[in-house]
Every structure is written in structure tokens, then in C-alpha cells.
Amino acid sequence: MGDQPNNPLHGLKLEQIIRELVNHYGWTSLGEKINIRCFTHNPSVKSSLAFLRKTPWAREKVEGLYLKYLRDSASKQ
């Protein structure tokens, strides 16, 4: 695999992304921002990983929210 200097998600594991979003937003707010069952009904990192790994559209939403979180964090500095 080649270098991807312009890809902020390069080298990040999905688990890291979920944990950071949960730490920042919390499960309740995350479920409001992305209304998928793995975030709204008995949420856990494990169940979220299982769902997101087999559901590309949901993973895209999570990655999009993570990129927005990164942009917002960078603009506050």
C-alpha cells in the first residue's frame, strides 16, 4: 500500500474512530447525529464494529462525522 498523505483516515482503525467519537459526543448524541441502531439500542464498540464492517453506507456516515470532528477540532486550535 502506498502513502496517502492527504487522507486523514489513513492508518486509523475503525475502532479508534468509534472510540474517539464516543469520547467526544457520547452514545446518546452520536445516536442522534447518526441514527443507526448500533448507536441507539444497547450501544457498544463491539456491536458497532460488527455492524459498520458489513454496512458500507453506515461506515461512510461515521467516517464523515469523524472528518467533521477533526475539522472542528483543528479550527478551535
Image (spheres, rainbow, N blue to C red):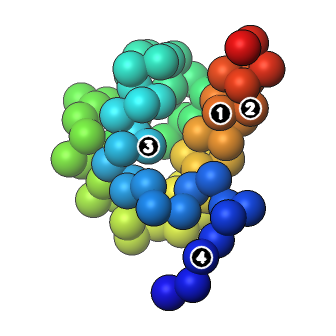
Q: Position of residue 38 (x, y in %)?
A: 35, 42
Q: Give the structural element (helix, strand or loop) at label 1.
A: helix
| Quadrant in which residue 76 is drawn | top right
Residue linked to disc 1: 70
Q: Earlier in the sequence, mark 1 or mark 4?
A: 4
Q: Residue furthest top?
A: 76
Residue 3 — which label? 4
Residue linked to disc 3: 17
Q: CA distance from mark 1 to mark 2?
A: 4 Å
Q: Earlier in the sequence, mark 1 or mark 3?
A: 3
Q: Amino acid at mark 1?
A: Leu
Q: Position of residue 45 (x, y in %)?
A: 25, 40
Residue linked to disc 2: 71
Q: CA distance from mark 1 to mark 3?
A: 11 Å
Q: Give the structural element (helix, strand or loop) at label 4.
A: loop
Q: Earlier in the sequence, mark 2 or mark 4?
A: 4
Observer-side mark, 3 or 4, equals 4
Q: Is residue 77 above or below residue 3?
A: above
Residue 24 appearing in the image: yes
Q: CA distance from mark 2 to mark 4?
A: 21 Å
Q: CA distance from mark 1 to mark 4?
A: 20 Å
Q: Residue furthest bottom?
A: 1
Q: Marks 1 and 2: CB-CB under 8 Å?
A: yes
Q: CA distance from mark 3 to mark 4?
A: 20 Å
Q: Position of residue 42 (x, y in %)?
A: 24, 29
Q: Earlier in the sequence, mark 2 or mark 3?
A: 3
Mark 3 residue crowding within 10 angstroms, few (<14) / some (14–19) / many (20+): some
Q: Is 56 displayed left or right of 46 in the figure? A: right
Q: Give the structural element (helix, strand or loop) at label 2.
A: helix
User: Which of the two residues, 12 or 43, is positioned nearer the viewer here?
Assistant: 12
